[in-house]
Amino acid sequence: MTVSYRQPGVVLTDRRFTVPLDHDDPAGETIELYAREVVAREKAGRDLPWLVYLQGGPGFGANRFIGKQAWLGRALEEYRVLLLDQRGTGHSTPANRQTLPLRGGPAEQADYLTRFRADSIVRDCEAIRPEVTGGAPWTVLGQSFGGFCTVAYLSTAPEGLDTALVTGGLPSLDAHADDVYRAAYPRVERKVTAHYARYPQDAERARRIADHLLTHDVVLPNGYRLTVEAFQSLGILLGSGDGSHRLHHLLEDAFVRTPAGPALSDAFQEQVQGLLSYAGHPLYALVHEAIYAQDSRPTAWSAERVRAEFPQFDAAKALAGDEPLLFTGETIHPWMFDCDPALRPLRETAELLAARTDWTPLYDPARLAANEVPVAAAVYHDDMYVHTAHSLETARAIRGLRTWVTDEFEHDGVRAGGPRVLDRLLALVRDEV
């Protein structure tokens, strides 16, 4: 049963679908997908082309917009939009510490989660498309990991696509996770250096907080153990357009005077736990490195291993000398499954996923080289999350793909610059620029 309701300027309809857990076994176990249909109120009765939105992540449900926020307003000028919660996220059979034990133990949970990558998400889209569009191809807009899914879509089911739009999400077609992180750490260092150039007072503030964490056992109100490494991971903020400013405001409110001496303030701890907890998106931690796995090599905690090649990120060494403390970025580490109460019960599951060697290919270079679907991609100069050189290499490998390379936005450009970013991509695929 579908339910429709209204927000300012739009009509929303909740849609639910049943799809196979394993698309190679269509008669086997099923899961439920949830999506929110959105149409401009004045066009609710019209026959419009469809645009399906694939959220970044992995592990995040689709944006919960209010009215015509961000890029959605531009899309609704000509499309009926489907905001899909990818499997395991939002309302789509969520996978987390509460639900995964229904699968059994860690081995069964790990086997289950191998079906939550881009290849399965694309097949979900193809399974529901006939019901949504009546069989007509649709436009896909993929942000970040959603762009990875879009390239997988072009590789496996291009017949389902009228147009493909990618924002900050052209993946390498063949890089191992080690290659991804080996390219990432220098980018993160550049972002941290730029942050300290903008806010030089933050260099000392960060050192003071890190030194405090080295000498105190700090447990946040939600049970998260705040270690130095966990504090450094707040650098993930630096990949968004306003992230440097948000980090600055966070650091300036870190300490408060108490009868026992300086302590990390309640306000600081409250903000930090919201930024570090994976309670709302545990799949991000569980399958993040698996989104790069395509060969017989395990990911084997790639970000943690590769970090050892960059000793400048060692907090103890930085504090022992006069080097600035470096934050880290979009990386997942085994210690997170010890620090975060939302991840602790899933530690063994994560270990089994990191050790797997049976990952299947996600992309088809030959099919991409023969692509006939109109494609445009926004590539952000020095994107902290997705390596620009990898993205441009992939852009050259997809026949007909047109790029907009810009330093006007960071990785979240489709949020910050919404209508203009989408407008530029649509103009590119339509040969209007």
Image (cartoon, rainbow, N blue to C red):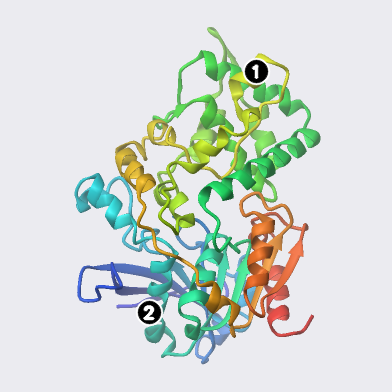
**Which residue was labeled with disc 2?**
128
Q: Percent from the top left, x then y, of residue 118?
A: 44, 65
- Is label 1 or label 2 in front? 1
Residue 371 located left or right of residue 382 = left
Up the image or down, 128 lies above or below 287; here it is: below
Q: Quadrant of the N terminus?
A: bottom left
Q: Is residue 11 visible?
A: no
Q: Percent from the top left, x then y, of residue 347?
A: 33, 38
At mark 1, the secondary structure is: helix
Front residue of this view, candidates 403 and 283: 403
Q: Percent from the top left, x then y, of residue 325?
A: 66, 26
**Of the residues under marks 1 and 2, which one precedes in the sequence?**
2
Q: Residues within 10 Å of mark 1 (few under 14, many from 20)?
A: some
**Which residue was labeled with disc 1?**
319
The residue sitting at the top extreme is 260
- Pointer 1 and pointer 2: residues touching (CB < 8 Å)? no
Up the image or down, 356 lies above or below 55; here it is: above
Front residue of this view, candidates 183 and 272: 183
Q: Residue at x 62, y 54 (%)?
A: 386
- Tell me the kind of residue under disc 2: Ile
- Tell me the kind of residue under disc 1: Leu
Q: Is residue 375 visible?
A: yes
Q: Percent from the top left, x then y, of residue 308?
A: 56, 32
For the residues labelled 1 and 2, the Cα–Cα distance comes to 54 Å
Q: Quadrant of the C terminus?
A: bottom right
| Callout count | 2
At mark 2, the secondary structure is: helix
The quadrant in which residue 344 appears is: top left
Q: Residues within 10 Å of mark 2 (few under 14, many from 20)?
A: some
Front residue of this view, candidates 19 and 313: 313
Q: Residue at x 65, y 62 (%)?
A: 391
Front residue of this view, candidates 368 and 57: 368
